[in-house]
Amino acid sequence: MKTKIISYISTWERRDYQAGIPDEADAKLEASGIAPSYRHICKAILKNDVALKSLGFSRQKTDSYSMLKKIEIEARNNKNERIRSIPKKTKNDIQRV
């Protein structure tokens, strides 16, 4: 969480706040993500927002999730291959029966 907060501050300092981000900003601007403030960071910490989604960060996908997705995709591809390998019945085959 510490690295994300440092990243948040440095990103805003690179954008337009070279002197540092303010302690407070307009609440509407903070909520929409247009203006940074230390108050907004504190609110995220107090809400126990570990992923800091309220500051604009997204949750990191775990290795387990990506492994599960690979297994699902492989299973789906194998199922499609099996369906394609089944010979299709023609009209002649149906009439013979």
Image (cartoon, helix red, strand yellow):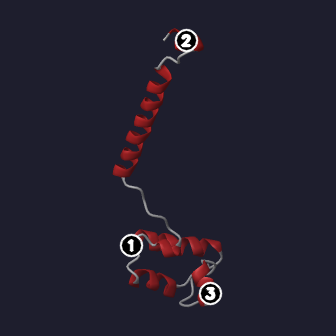
Q: Residues within 10 Å of mark 2 (few under 14, many from 20)?
A: few
- Residue at the spot of label 1: 50
Residues at marks 3 and 1, CA–CA distance in whole angstroms: 23 Å
Q: Earlier in the sequence, mark 1 or mark 2?
A: 1
* Residue 23 on image: x %, y %: 53, 90
- Residue at the spot of label 2: 95
- Residue at the spot of label 3: 28
- Outermost residue to the right: 16
- Between circles 3 and 2, the one closer to the viewer is 2
Check the image and report above or below for 83 versus 33: above
Q: Amino acid at mark 1?
A: Val
Check the image and report above or below for 20 versus 76: below
Per the image, label 2 sits on a secondary structure element best described as: helix
- Between circles 1 and 2, the one closer to the viewer is 2
Q: Earlier in the sequence, mark 3 or mark 2?
A: 3
Q: Nearer the viewer, residue 24 or 82?
A: 82
